[in-house]
Image (tube, rainbow, N blue to C red):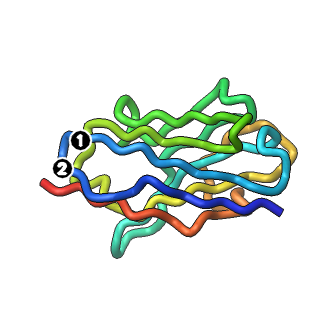
């Protein structure tokens, strides 16, 4: 079993930055893809970014490409989401998730992620 705990959310003005962290415990961290998703009020959960086992490959939603960076430190069992140039439309609860399938392919489909954190609120004021 894997347990995920997010941190780092908060209130920031438009144009500002935040870094989210997701600490994992349980199964060997370097053996599964990690992703970040977000859900705004009244909207469905959407994919934000994902990173491969080793951290060598990453994939981003078009809406965050060039502004957000996902990274991982397997020695610390932690995945990060650096968010720059934040916009009010980035306001949402952000969730990290683990795809525990024994394949290295990055997926954007929430249904392929087995384990989810509790979420952390990010609010961007205009």
Residue 63 found in image quarter: top left
- Element marked by disc 2: strand
> In this orientation, which residue lies closer to the viewer: 10 or 85?
10
Which quadrant: the N terminus? bottom right
Q: Which residue is mark 2?
A: 13
Residue at 78% x, 38% y: name it: 30
Q: Is residue 9 left or right of residue 22?
A: left
Q: Is residue 29 above or below residue 3?
A: above
Label 2 crowd (10 A; few <14 / some 14-19 / many >=20):
some
**Residues at marks 2 and 1 touching, judged by CB atoms closer than 8 Å:** yes
| Image spot of residue 25 (x, y percent) | 75, 55
Label 1 crowd (10 A; few <14 / some 14-19 / many >=20):
some
Residue at 36% x, 66% y: name it: 40
Q: Is residue 1 above or below residue 70?
A: below
| Image spot of residue 39 (x, y percent) | 43, 65
Which quadrant: the C terminus? bottom left
| Image spot of residue 5 (x, y percent) | 60, 60
Question: In the current view of this chain or complex, which residue is farthest to the top?
Answer: 56
Residue at 57% x, 34% y: name it: 71
Residue 16 found in image quarter: top left
Residue 42 found in image quarter: bottom left
Q: Is residue 73 above or below residue 39?
A: above
| Image spot of residue 22 (x, y percent) | 58, 51
Q: Is residue 104 left or right of residue 49?
A: right
Residue at 73% x, 52% y: name it: 99
Q: Which residue is mark 1?
A: 16
Question: In the current view of this chain or complex, which residue is farthest to the front?
Answer: 76
- Element marked by disc 1: loop
**Measured Cα–Cα span from mark 2 to mark 1:** 6 Å
């Amino acid at each position: 079993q894997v347990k995920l705990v997010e941190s780092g959310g908060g209130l920031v003005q438009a144009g500002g930055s935040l870094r989210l962290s997701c600490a994992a415990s349980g199964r060997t961290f370097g053996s599964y893809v990690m992703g970040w998703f977000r859900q705004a009020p009244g909207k469905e959960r959407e994919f934000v970014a994902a990173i491969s086992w080793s951290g060598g490959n990453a994939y981003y939603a078009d809406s965050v490409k060039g502004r957000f960076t996902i990274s991982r430190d397997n020695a610390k069992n932690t995945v990060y989401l650096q968010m720059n140039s934040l916009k009010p439309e980035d306001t949402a609860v952000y969730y990290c998730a683990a795809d525990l399938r024994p394949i290295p392919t990055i997926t954007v489909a929430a249904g392929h992620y087995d384990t989810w954190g509790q979420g952390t609120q990010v609010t961007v004021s205009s």
